[in-house]
Amino acid sequence: MALTDTHWRSLFQERDFRRLWMVGFSIFVVRWLETLAVGVFAYNATGSAFIVAMLTMLRLLPMGLFGAFLGAAAERMDLRRAQILILVVQILASAVIALLALLGVIAVWHLAVAAFINGVGWAADNPVRRAMIGTVVGPARMGTAMSIDVGTSNASRMLGPTLGGVLLALLGLDGTFVLATLLYLPALIAALLLPPTARSAASRPAPVLARIAEGLAAVRADRRLSGTLMITLIFNLFGWPFTSMIPVIGKDQLALGPEGVGLLASMDGVGALVGAVLITLFIGPALYRRTYIGGLTTYLCMVIAFALIPNPWFAGLALILVGIGGSGFGIMQPTLIYLATPVELRSRVLGLLSVCIGMGPIGFIGLGIAAECLGAPMATALMAGCGLVALAVTHRYWKHISGG
């Protein structure tokens, strides 16, 4: 059995790692809870798969717009204060949506604004919270730490959508967002208990654009970094957008209600949690590259299967396998970037990782348009198939990726 360098239990003996883990867990649960509830509500209100895709896309758009700037700015900031500010803004956004829903004046554009605001917090997660995790655990334990962190995100993909579907059916959109607001509070308390963080010792006064340019130069000069980011682009353009179609496919093709759609959406979280546990126990640095590429390949293949299967049980099984593949991809993505990047450039390059993730809106727009023309199942399968083609065509760019 190829255990990681340091057993995962040792990480939870680190007080600050536990706090950062709690911040992530709360954010992850709320993210998936709100995404599912907003998707079902918007589709019931508008009947448009395109609108559902756009609402999900708006959570990713800030990564493409601001990821590089957030990464460059993070090196000059107290990351603890930045994390607290992010949480306060997200709490206020969810609370306002809950209030509007309680008053009966909620509109789809309100949800769009809230999705964009929360997307800014998502864009800052790599250069802020995950950068702090790296500082706390060190390079030797980063792979294990990311297995736990991504595994936590995957576990939240079981809990969040299920809660979202049940709450939307029982309490409506207002009850869903009231719970979302409350779930942020443990994260805020944990962030307040973190120690202040000094800016990078290697940091020096320089314009933000110049710092971004230095990060880009580092990526161009290192084939490991450029290859890893290439794979990230493929995933976010052709793989990730399918999640916006789960409520549509669940309702139209599989004839499920809100509770059933929520349960279906949680299935890839089940698989991803299993995948994260297996990676934590069995995957060492020598297998990081294969896990990264193999995870994406499995993910895309199983998305095609999910889109074309008319039976909800087998569709759920396909989503479990989607989750296992996505776990390998998701864990290795920040780990490979962190290990290949010099310490003085990590926040910047992690910010560029957020930019690559933020290219996802292009895929969401394309999938939304295709779904209006071809139907959600066929459009979803076609998009994932294009991802497999893109993976094969770009082999020369990512073949140099390694684990250490």
Image (spheres, grey):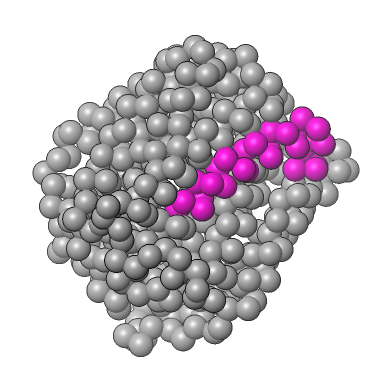
Q: Is residue 183 left or right of residue 137?
A: right
Q: Which span of residues is magenta-colored? A: 150-176
Q: Can residue 185 be seen in the rendering of this structure?
A: yes
Tell which of 340 and 276 is nearer to you.
276
Q: Is residue 225 magenta?
A: no
Q: Could you tell whether 37 is left or right of 124 in the image?
A: right
Residue 96 picture location, percent across and down: 77, 53
> Which secondary structure is most common in the magenta stretch?
helix
Image location of residue 347, percent across then percent down: 37, 70
Residue 71 in sight = no
The answer to which of 161 and 72 lies nearer the viewer is 161
The residue furthest front is: 1
Task: Identify the residue shown where x is 35% and y is 58%.
Answer: 334
Q: Classify residue 381 as left or right of residue 25.
A: left
Q: Name the residue rendered at 54%, 27% in the picture.
A: 246
Residue under the point 62% across and 38% down? 161
224 above or below 129? above
- Please give the name of the residue rendered at 64% of the width and 50% of the height, measured from the top-left corner: 30
Residue 192 screen position, x and y as percent? 64, 76
